[in-house]
Amino acid sequence: MASPDIAGGNAGGLLAFMDFMIDKGYGSAGAIGPWKSAAKQVFSIVEGDDFESLDVRSLDIDEYMDRFQNRTIGKYSAESLRAYRQRFRKAVEAYRAYLADPNWRPSLKRTARPKKGDAGSPKRSKATASTSSPTEAATPPVPSAPTASLIAYPFPLKSGQMAQLHLPAKGLDREDADRLTHFLRALVFDQPAQIGPGAADEDE
């Protein structure tokens, strides 16, 4: 199978362009890889396996991502969906910019290493941390003790931490148990395998 034409203006060309940017050193695999993974996943969910011929030059990104979200209801958390939308947008906009100007280069923010004696030195950082905002310096809240009518049920998490559920001593009725189950499921964050940490997300 022939390689997609980068200048074709279609989904296959977009994915090839992601590889092109990495190969040319325009961006690291850690920065560009998540864009490509998100784009490939979105295209395959909305279009199926034969998505490479889809013209992306006039694609309505928001409408297209709404279609992706509708097709994956219950599969991804809200945070994962935001990551998909953000990275898909970056991939499409970068590709369109390249099609408009082949000399275009991506602008990816990079975190500069602190020099000795500057604001990033350990001594300076310690002083800065002491004057940080209450939100930044806040420590995790201490769980409140259960009341006389509640019992603390310890629950070991996969991370090794121990959670506590404060539930009525007489137990839960079925309706409350169902509501609690739905509440806990709403807190689940399933990070898709296709979405990995990318340095490119720092510029949002």
Image: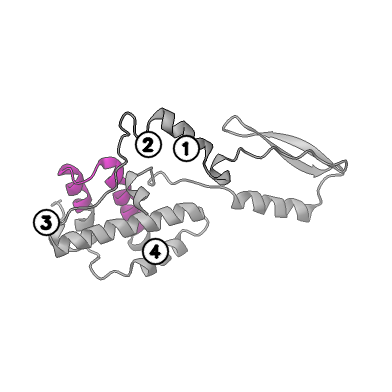
- Residue plotted at (26% across, 41% down): 29
- Residue plotted at (36% across, 57% down): 42
Q: Quadrant of residue 113?
A: top left
Closer mark to the observer between disc 4 and disc 1: 1
Q: Which mark is residue 35?
A: none
Left or right of residue 80: residue 60: left
Q: Quadrant of the C terminus?
A: bottom left
Crowd class of label 4 (few under 14; some 14 to 19; many from 20; radius 10 Å): many
- Residue plotted at (27% across, 60% down): 92
With respect to residue 52, does 170 lie above or below?
Answer: above
Reading the image, the residue beneath label 1 is 128
Residue 55, image x, y percentages:
23, 67
What amino acid does circle 3 point to? Answer: Asn
N-terminal of the pair, mark 3 or mark 2, is 3
Looking at the picture, the colour scheme in use is one colour
What amino acid does circle 1 point to? Answer: Thr
Q: Are marks 3 and 1 in contact (CB under 8 Å)?
A: no
